[in-house]
Image (cartoon, rainbow, N blue to C red):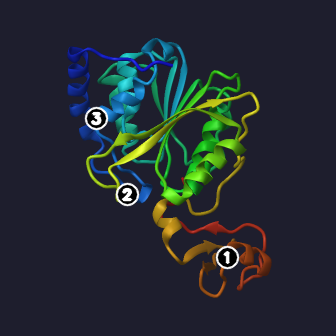
Amino acid sequence: MNSFQLNDEEKKQILSKYAEFSSLRGEPNQELDQYFVTQDTSLKRVLLFQPEEYENKWIIFLGDMDLVGFHLGLLAKPKDLAVLDIDKRMPEIVFSMKFNYKIRSARYINHDLRIRMLAVLKNQYDFIFTESPMTIEGNEVFLSRAVQCAKKDGDSRIILSTDIKEEKKDELYSLFDQMNLEVEQHIKDFNKYSFKTVLGKTNSDLFILRVLENSKENIVNHYLGPMFFREIEQKVKPYRCKCGNIIEIGKKISSVDELYEKGCPKCGHKEVFVYNSSIKLE
């Protein structure tokens, strides 16, 4: 894998289109751990591979408010360029890609990654780009969905852009090992932001992960816990019982494990409890 270089004129034309196109997305939704990267970073992610490597390939973006798919669609003609997101702005963005910028393979899929992956998307994709939340839990969910989407032929790649607390870095590598993902490249501080993220930084890392024949997701079905940074960091976490009762973990009940052991204080239910996120399940 060798990164590709554009000449100055090609780069100028693409960045000019991007400046016009990016106005569609507005401001980052920090509740979803969105911190938009610079124009240059968005383009550089695509240029990690030669444009011909994307030709007639199946490509999916698990979240793409950094608009990397836009750059990829301008430089190559993949068989499928799917953007899976829950951000309400994304349908208009993909519509513009398809009809205003003639990226014919672009399509939008409204799917919440906390819900198990759609069967029609499994084992289909050659390249999976993902921008995961800034938590280990978020990385586990997003990587699991990426592995589910990837072809298991040894040629598929996951391009993971992520940042987590420094003390959690070993846990991230542990996730790679658990899912049998080979780290082909770890580029520190690859992603540049124009303002500080919730971690107080202006950059984050990028990983190129090779999906192997025995790669396997950690999370097969639904994920019902907290995932985004503000959810993980808050001391009291609300969970909802099937009876509608809200149980606050961190007060009278100290952990989710204790909740499952004791059951709902109102109805005694002990099976499934759902984290009561402010970001409602789609």
Q: Mark 3 Cα within 10 Å, few/some/many (few <14, many 20+)? A: many
Query: How many C-alpha atoms fall within 10 Å of the one at disc 2: few (<14), some, or many (≥20)?
Result: some
Q: Secondary structure at mark 2?
A: helix
Where is residue 172 drawn, in percent x and y? 59, 49
* Residue 47 image point, x, y percent: 40, 23
Q: Amino acid at mark 2?
A: Gln
Task: Give the residue at mark 3.
Answer: 39
Amino acid type of the residue tagged 1 in the rendering: Ser
Give the Cα separation between the discs numbered 1 and 2.
Answer: 26 Å
| Image point (67%, 76%), residue name | 255
Q: Earlier in the sequence, mark 1 or mark 2?
A: 2
**Is the residue under label 2 in contact with that under label 1 (CB below 8 Å)?**
no
Q: Position of residue 76 (x, y in %)?
A: 41, 16
- Left or right, 269 with respect to 248, comes to right
Residue bearing mark 2: 30
| Residue tagged 1 | 255
